[in-house]
Image (spheres, rainbow, N blue to C red):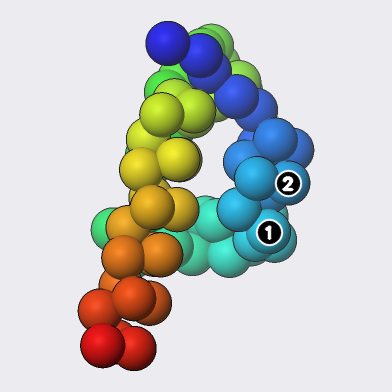
Amino acid sequence: MRLIKLKDVMYTTGLARSTVYKYMNEGNFPKPVSLGERNVAWLESEIQDWILEKIEQRDMAAA
């Protein structure tokens, strides 16, 4: 299990910071884990699962 910071989430997903937080508020993105007062990170596996879900949605739409 690995935690990744926002910079890595943005790099991995290709999303902007504001989009990550917008999707989270809409319930469409994994929630971060609090590491302290002003410090959060995401489970890398949850981010990868989210990406795989997006790929699956794309493939279902194309079929």
Residue at image x 65%, y 61%?
Answer: 15
- Furthest residue in direction front, as rendered: 63
Quarter location, residue 54: bottom left
Residue 62 place in picture, x, y as percent: 34, 88
Query: 11 and 21: which one is in front?
Result: 11
Residue at image x 68%, y 59%?
Answer: 14
| The C terminus: image quadrant | bottom left
Q: Secondary structure at mark 1?
A: loop
Seen in the picture, residue 57 relative to 14 is either above or below; the reply is: below
Residue 59 place in picture, x, y as percent: 34, 76
Q: Which residue is mark 1?
A: 14
Query: 15 and 59: which one is in front?
Result: 59
Residue 40 seen in render = no
Residue at image x 52%, y 55%?
Answer: 21
Are the residues flagged by discs 1 and 2 in contact, CB closer than 8 Å? Answer: yes
Q: Amino acid at mark 2?
A: Tyr
